[in-house]
Image (cartoon, rainbow, N blue to C red):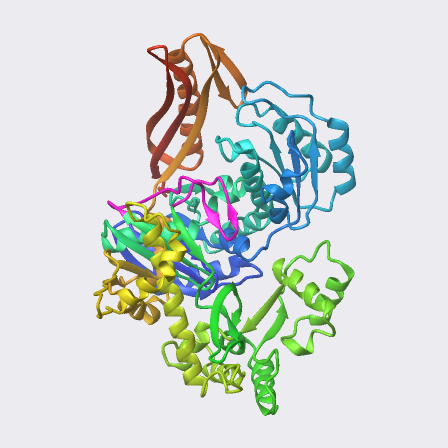
Amino acid sequence: MAILLGVDTGGTYTDAVLVRDDREVIASAKALTTRADLALGVRAAISAVLGQSGIDPAAIALASLSTTLATNALVEGQGGRVALIYIGFRAQDLEKHGLAAALKGDPALVLDGGHTHAGVPVMPLDQPALRSFLTAHRGQVSGYAVAAQFATRNPAHEREAARMIADLTGAPVTCSHELSARLNGPKRAITAVLNARLIGMTHRLIGRTRDALDRLGIAAPLMVVRGDGALMSAQQARARPIETILSGPAASIVGARWLTGARDALVSDIGGTTTDVAVLRDGRPAIDPAGAQVGAFRTMVEAVAMRTTGLGGDSQVHVNAAGLAGGISLGPRRVLPVSLLAHEAPDAVLPALEQQLRATVPGEYDARFVRAVPGMQAEGLAPREADLLGRLGDTVWPFDRVLRNRMEHNALARLIDRGLVQVAGPTPSDAAHVLGMVTAWNRTAAGLALTLLARKRVGTGDQLAAGPEAMAGMIVAQLTRQTALALLETAFAEDTPDFGVPAADLARHVLTHRGLAGHRGLLALDVALNLPVVGLGASAPAYYPAVGEALRCRMILPEHAGVANAIGAVVGRVTMRRSGTVTAPSEGRFRVHLDSGPEDFTSSEEALQRIEAALRAAASADAAAAGAEDIDVAVTRDIRTARLEARDVFVEAMITVEASGRPRVATG
């Protein structure tokens, strides 16, 4: 019977699990995620699970990785510096469609070129302008994104630009038509930009993970989980890392189904950085028809219909001093828990916390620390950023001892966005330590940090909380509230029929919360979730029973909830989809839009058969390259017609081919 290894790299922990032939969990283990080099945490987790199980590494037949790397990078605004080549569009589209926000100041070139909806060139590609741009930016960006108008109808200009970029720079290139066959050029461009931004870090993670497996004596093939829960080869993930956004959450859905057998449920997975909520219907997660959304970005990546909220065990605690009562909120940024930092560097953290407590007036930056992430490559820094990073060195610093002036706030923010610097501060994980719910790290540091936080003043002049235990209770209660809101938003958004009011408004409406409280007056109001919730994540047993009570629903906490992502990473299937379009540019002419360019036919059925054959071959080849065997192929035809003079006239067809199979396993 085959032994399978699943690994999940989360924001705080990296999990490893050994499963026997898709039927039994042999062992599981955790190690701290090592942000500077994720593979170190991967190796530590795998070593721990091998030691716990006594399994011979050579007996492992398949290894599979799910990762929050891409999701967290986009939520936290991290990734490499990239350039966009935008062909056939208008310069104002950069602002209008959100591309400027996705670029975050990175360079872009708007070029003449592109095609019509029928795949006919509008004008030639402006090669001299592209050559000049590439020469000016050579060595200053880590990758390029190329998006051309109607590239899904004819990708010739994207391919031509990609060849020039490869020849002149040697940098990785992402073409938008390779990521999606659907129209909407600006949205494809955003997807390409994000993909290009992720290539470097994903390449490093997969390469170092492969090295870690080899050093441990594991020669099994390595797979990676896509955002729809299917598996892809490591090589495919290196080229298209954007497809791994929501990889960890998607794996959790697969793991939840495997662990509980639930067919209809809400699945909520709390990690260090995010809480991910999805609906399981008839045993299958729904695919988001609009494309995966992470943070502020709506992409064209096929992924599970997942609502990702910047809320986790390591979410930053924000104090709201306005108003008489005051209060707190959590997230969306992740910070390092003070208890964890003190666990790693007690001599730097504990004395600083004690010194801050001796001050008679609460400080603005009490209980907050900063450190450079060791081993990270610092390229293309502005002088102020380079100076600040150099001053940090390899020491843990109290926040207020680092910033000399307000100008350095922006420099520090940019270093944090690029993942070069980590900030530590009070989090729900620290609250859990103070309340005795968790004992993994330094409880003393957690207590000191929450004492400092509790001293902050609200509008009345009173302290925010009476002490560390009261402060911890406030934080856990706020986590419960925000988690309940995330679940309510998902339920309202996915419920049928549509309520006609935004889900976020309904989740926060006073009548909803009076109903949850079972209001009885002239009106009797009752609101409850009508499906069970499967709670996943290492901290789910600590936090989620209260969430179930708040939503008046059954809370399922499976035995291996803390490693559900790692389980889902290795029990899934390889599934590859290819889509293509047939249009009718004139009566009696049917145009097939292929990667190689348009082809015309005089029969609609002949055109449909041509594109279906091409897509079958491509999807099957993709699945085989991903390591699938016993491949099944399914074809879906979405044909649009119009009624004209008492007859149906062909307008357009979208053909989707899905090739699926179990991953091949090593046999010795």
Looking at the picture, tell me which residue is in the foreground, 639 or 2: 639
Image coordinates for residue 44, horizontal then vertical, percent:
46, 63
Residue 533: which quarter of the image? Answer: bottom left
Image coordinates for residue 387, horizontal then vertical, percent:
76, 66
Looking at the picture, tell me which residue is in the foreground, 13 or 625: 13
Left or right side of 543 for 241: right
Q: Is residue 627 magenta?
A: no
Looking at the picture, tell me which residue is in the foreground, 252 or 650: 650
Q: Is residue 300 magenta?
A: yes
In the rendered view, would you say 312 is above or below 459?
above
Image coordinates for residue 342, horizontal then vertical, percent:
53, 78
Q: Which residues are magenta?
A: 281-304
In the rendered view, would you say 223 is above or below 153?
below
Looking at the picture, tell me which residue is in the foreground, 468 or 572: 468
Image coordinates for residue 521, horizontal then vertical, percent:
22, 70
Residue at the spot x=52%, y=74% of the render?
Answer: 320
Give the quarter of the figure containing the C terminus: top left
Main SS, magenta region, reads loop
* Residue 144 visible to the viewer: no
Residue at the spot x=60%, y=92% of the render?
Answer: 360
